[in-house]
């Protein structure tokens, strides 16, 4: 599949809703356009998923047969790596090099979960029970069965299209579910390649059904559908709450991977050179459009000035540019809407007395580029300090001791990730326990592995992805009792 053929295919995809323009965020020019699929198309997709699940064409295959097909998907993703990377890069504006790195990571989701196809099982319990109306104990054989949820809805955002799609599709397929899959309206392109790959790899018709459209139309139709048993959603906390409401009709199970306002704590005993470099990349990578980006940095007072200067210096060396700019380290924001939002927060900070150490402005060129921005002297009541900005904007404040660092770090409604930079081992582990976040990194940031569970505390989510928890999220547990 060539990049050009994908741009044409999506244009010709049937749909009954509005026409949606796909914009290159680095140039603000239209790449292609497509029709919102509309509610009927979602209903059809769910019907196909239900039929495939009931027929058992996928769920009833032996685990080893599903595993082989998942491996084939991974191989085909790698065979199509360059097209996928180019599509994601042009569609999100991320540097091509970064998009190229995402593709093998996406493929690995299918290999990792191929392994789990043959390893998920229930447990047996040797118990005696008297029942409720007897005082005689009898031997029982009780065991659990792990069963796929059935039809699941998979909805995800634009910030890493192939990665986000694979993170959900691989465990859902491994578990034996059929699915309706909706990529973000901003970035539907690489999903079309995945759709082809999944069919080519041998996943039977109707098991995976892609729909393309807006969240409030196609997405909402999935979350409200009575035949969808579970929704796995990655996106903003605001939409996550909306999904909980619309899923209530049939009490869908809901898995949520939501936003963050992640703290990074840097002590005076840390290896400062590395801490500064990593904390800077931890917020500015992908122009701050990563859920675990460390957007609130807290620095022990003795090294505060040095760290602020260091992070601002890194910010000033990062070259911004689109996929065609070879030296670009970071790309633009995804959309005009996101640009307006990010600049609004920066303006709020300026008006509220924050000091702009560097950045604070968009680039004087086409494209939604914002200079990496470092703010100090920030009033912690401002929205910019409280809300997830999802842009290249960091606030840096000083602290004196552990208690103050923990209090400041935990003073947020989010709880996705946190990082600690210190060379004191006990302090690191003590703090890791006290921080209210689903992931805590010590002397590292932006760490990830397919095998390690990931999920948010507080308003950053419900449930876990990745690892064993990742496949169990797509399975329900049945208890079976037999009197011996
Ligand atoms: P978003 O919530 O606006 O949209 C995400 C997806 O939900 C899109 O596909 C969108 O079409 C769909 N959607 C929107 N409204 C919907 C509705 N009413 N019903 C059903 N679906 C709907 O998020 P975004 O702005 O595209 O993405 C950025 C957000 O994603 C940030 O908050 C970021 O932190 C979060 N995110 C979280 C993780 C994580 O793993 N925790 C990973 C990546 C991104």
Image (cartoon, grey):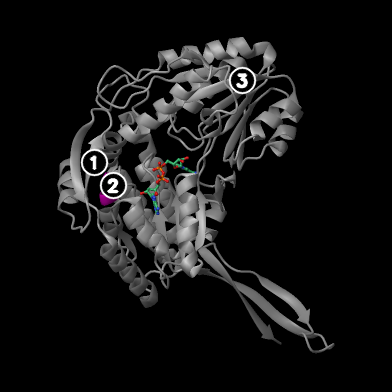
Q: Specify whether 273 is left or right of 4.
A: right
- Magenta highlight on residue 191: yes
- Magenta highlight on residue 14: no
Q: Earlier in the sequence, mark 3 or mark 1?
A: 1
The residue pinned by badge 1 equals 22
Ligand 1 near label 2 (Cβ, under 8 Å)? Answer: no
Q: Which mark is residue 397?
A: 3
Please report the bounds of the magenta region as a residue range: 188-192
Q: Are marks 2 and 3 in contact (CB under 8 Å)?
A: no
SS label for mark 3: strand
Ligand 1 near label 1 (Cβ, under 8 Å)? Answer: no
Main secondary structure of the magenta stretch: helix
Coordinates of residue 356 in the picture (x, y in percent): 49, 14
Q: Which mark is residue 188?
A: 2
Against 122, is 395 above or below?
above
Q: Specify whether 467 is left or right of 390.
A: right
Against 38, is 364 above or below?
above
Quadrant in which residue 38 is drawn: bottom left
Q: Residue at x 53, y 59 (%)?
A: 473
Q: Is residue 114 visible?
A: no
Total residue callouts: 3
């Amino acid at each position: 599949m060539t990049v050009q053929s994908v741009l044409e295919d999506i244009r010709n995809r049937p749909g009954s809703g509005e026409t949606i323009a796909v914009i290159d965020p680095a140039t603000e020019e239209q790449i292609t356009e497509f029709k919102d699929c509309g509610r009927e198309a979602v209903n059809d997709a769910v019907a196909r998923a239900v039929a495939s699940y009931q027929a058992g064409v996928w769920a009833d295959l032996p685990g080893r047969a599903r595993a082989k097909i998942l491996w084939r998907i991974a191989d085909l993703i790698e065979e199509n790596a360059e097209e996928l990377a180019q599509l994601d890069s042009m569609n999100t504006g991320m540097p091509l090099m970064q998009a190229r790195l995402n593709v093998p990571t996406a493929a690995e989701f299918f290999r990792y979960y191929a392994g789990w196809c043959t390893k998920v099982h229930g447990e047996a319990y040797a118990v005696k029970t008297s029942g409720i109306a007897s005082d005689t104990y009898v031997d029982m054989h009780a065991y659990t069965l792990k069963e796929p949820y059935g039809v699941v809805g998979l909805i995800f955002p634009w910030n890493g299209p192939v990665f986000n799609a694979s993170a959900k599709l691989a465990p859902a397929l491994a578990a034996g579910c059929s699915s309706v899959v909706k990529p973000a309206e901003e970035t539907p392109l690489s999903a079309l390649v995945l759709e082809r790959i999944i069919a080519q790899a041998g996943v039977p018709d109707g098991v995976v059904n892609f729909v393309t459209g807006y969240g409030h139309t196609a997405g909402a139709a999935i979350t409200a559908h009575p035949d969808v048993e579970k929704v796995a959603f990655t996106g903003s906390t605001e939409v996550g709450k909306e999904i909980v409401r619309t899923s209530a009709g049939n009490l869908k199970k809901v898995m949520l991977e939501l936003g963050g306002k992640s703290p990074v704590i840097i002590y005076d005993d840390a290896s400062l050179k590395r801490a500064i470099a990593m904390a800077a990349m931890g917020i500015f990578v992908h122009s701050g459009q990563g859920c675990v980006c460390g957007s609130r940095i807290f620095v022990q007072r003795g090294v505060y000035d040095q760290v602020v200067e260091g992070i601002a210096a890194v910010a000033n060396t990062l070259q911004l540019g689109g996929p065609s700019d070879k030296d670009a380290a970071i790309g633009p924001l995804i959309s005009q809407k996101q640009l307006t939002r990010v600049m609004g927060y920066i303006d709020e900070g300026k008006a509220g007395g924050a000091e702009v150490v560097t950045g604070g402005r968009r680039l004087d060129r086409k494209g939604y580029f914002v200079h990496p921005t470092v703010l100090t002297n920030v009033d912690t009541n401002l929205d910019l300090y409280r809300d997830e900005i999802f842009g290249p904007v960091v606030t840096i404040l000083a602290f004196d001791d552990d208690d103050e660092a923990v209090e400041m770090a935990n003073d947020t409604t989010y709880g996705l990730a946190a990082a600690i930079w210190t060379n004191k081992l006990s302090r690191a582990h003590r703090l890791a326990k006290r921080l209210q976040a689903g992931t805590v990194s010590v002397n590292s940031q932006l760490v990830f592995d397919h095998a390690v569970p990931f999920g948010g505390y507080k308003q950053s989510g419900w449930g876990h992805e990745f690892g064993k928890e990742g496949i169990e999220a797509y399975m329900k547990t049945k208890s079976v009792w037999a009197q011996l």
